[in-house]
Amino acid sequence: MEAMALEIACIATWITGVPELIRNELNGVLMPPGGEVELARALGRLMDDSDLRLRVAESARQRVLEHYDLNRNVEAFNELANAKIV
């Protein structure tokens, strides 16, 4: 998430909660865990395809800003915590 916020194109494995943050080829590149060949391919794609690299990096930053802003999320949490349950 920190790299995404800095507008760095990310490659990550398709495990646990990662696909909730990174959407394959929209704001990063996902690959299966333990795949050295897949990692090399993903790195090669991002190195060779500047349009893809820039697009996923910009989209990644936008996703973090829109969905993971600490101040906004703390405020939303406080509103939920203070809401009266009827």
Image (spheres, rainbow, N blue to C red):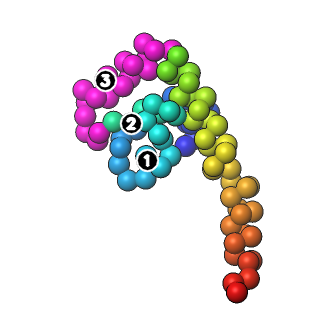
Q: Position of residue 75 (x, y in %)?
A: 75, 63
Please tell me which residue is depicted at 51% across the width and 22% down the height of the picture: 53
Q: What type is the residue that disc 2 sits on?
A: Leu
Dot 1 and dot 2 residues touching (CB under 8 Å) = yes
Q: Which mark is residue 40?
A: 3
- Under tag 2, what secondary structure? strand
The C terminus - image quarter: bottom right
Q: CA distance from mark 3 to mark 1?
A: 19 Å
Could you give the CA–CA distance between mark 2 and mark 3, rounded to whole angstroms?
Answer: 12 Å
In this rendering, would 25 be left or right of 62?
Answer: left
Q: Nearer the viewer, residue 38 or 25?
A: 25
> In the image, what residue occupies the spot 56% across and 24% down?
55
Give yes or no for contact between labels 3 and 1 (Cβ–Cβ under 8 Å).
Answer: no
Label 3: which secondary element: helix
Please identify the quadrant where the N terminus is shown. Answer: top right
Question: Residue 51 location, x and y as percent?
Answer: 52, 16
Q: Which mark lies nearer to you, 2 or 3?
A: 2
- 39 over 63 or under it: above or below: above
SS majority, magenta: helix
Q: Which residue is mark 1?
A: 18
Q: Amino acid at mark 1?
A: Val
The residue sitting at the front extreme is 86
Tell me where residue 80 appears, x and y as whole percent. Answer: 69, 72
Q: Which residues are magenta?
A: 32-50
